[in-house]
Amino acid sequence: MKKFLLIITLFTFSITFAQHSGEELKASVVNSADDSALANVHVLNLNQVIGTVSDDNGDFIIPARVNDTLYFSYIGFKSIKVRVTNDMLKFQNTKVGLTELALALEEVVVRPFQLTGYLEIDSKNLPINQAARYSISGLNVGYEAGSRNPNAFSKIMGSIFNPADFLHNLFGKKPAQMRKLRKMQDDDKIRNLLSEKYDRETLMALLQVDKQEIQEILINCNYSDSFIETANDLQILDAISNCYEEYKVLNRGN
């Protein structure tokens, strides 16, 4: 009889474990001020690099394991990270509250361009993006040389012949983070989110790098100031990914 009870207990435990270990999290997102549901909140599992969005009721389902970190992002609300716990997977009814940001209008500076109506004159007075871009056959990537670096082309050629120095300090110390790039690019929900953002916050959370490191990567890959300042987060992601693919080519065999 005791043996039978032991078998039943182990069987019940195995079913319970299977239900909560393989692992989908069902939860909802609400406005912490009034508990109202928030639709279209982007939820990213930073560990598994998987994204989803909340529905009209604020509900979402996402693959998750214990200790995975979920990143919640929604326009007008403060982004947060939440660590997945056993209880969250067991009870599947967790509510995650987001706090609304105070709206602040930034000062807009309008630069006066004195237009005369004559194309030949007006075209000389308008600012022009001077960024040039070079490509090297065989690498299938380009190099953008902005005003920051007028000797970018010679730097690029130098890097080809000195692969140990090119990008190694940027990517060589972050192999785990950089391996996430392909998964990020393949997830449509992540791509859609990044295409709407310009603050680099989601990229920093996914890649576990800070804004300064992102800027250094782009500078060392010879992207111009104008690109770094105006590109959306998806364009930045693709630029970093191209840079990393180039690093792997140059570093092959080392």
Image (cartoon, rainbow, N blue to C red):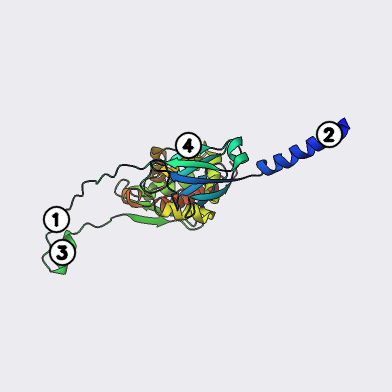
* Residue 146 coordinates in the image, percent (x, y): 32, 50
The mark nearer the N terminus, 1 or 2, is 2
The mark nearer the N terminus, 3 or 2, is 2
* Residue 238 coordinates in the image, percent (x, y): 46, 52
Q: Residues within 10 Å of mark 3 (few under 14, many from 20)?
A: few
* Residue 51 coordinates in the image, percent (x, y): 52, 50
Which of discs 1 and 3 lies nearer the camera? The answer is 1
- The residue located at (34%, 42%) in the rendering is 101
The mark nearer the N terminus, 1 or 3, is 1
Please give the label number shown on residue 5: 2
148 to 196, vertically: above or below: above
Query: What amino acid does circle 1 point to?
Result: Pro
Q: Is residue 247 visible?
A: no
Query: What amino acid does circle 3 point to?
Result: Asp
The mark nearer the N terminus, 3 or 4, is 3
The mark nearer the N terminus, 1 or 4, is 1
C-alpha gap between disc 1 and disc 3: 12 Å
Quickly name the residue at label 3.
122
C-alpha gap between disc 3 and disc 2: 89 Å
200 to 67, vertically: above or below: below
- Circles 4 and 2, Cβ within 8 Å, touching? The answer is no
Can you say which quadrant of the picture contains the N terminus?
top right
Front position in the image: 215 or 185: 185
Which of discs 3 and 4 lies nearer the camera? The answer is 3
Q: Is residue 131 visible?
A: yes
Instruction: Look at the numbered disc 4 and give the secondary structure of its residue.
Output: helix
Instruction: Look at the numbered disc 2 and give the secondary structure of its residue.
Output: helix
Quickly name the residue at label 1.
112
Quickly name the residue at label 4.
169
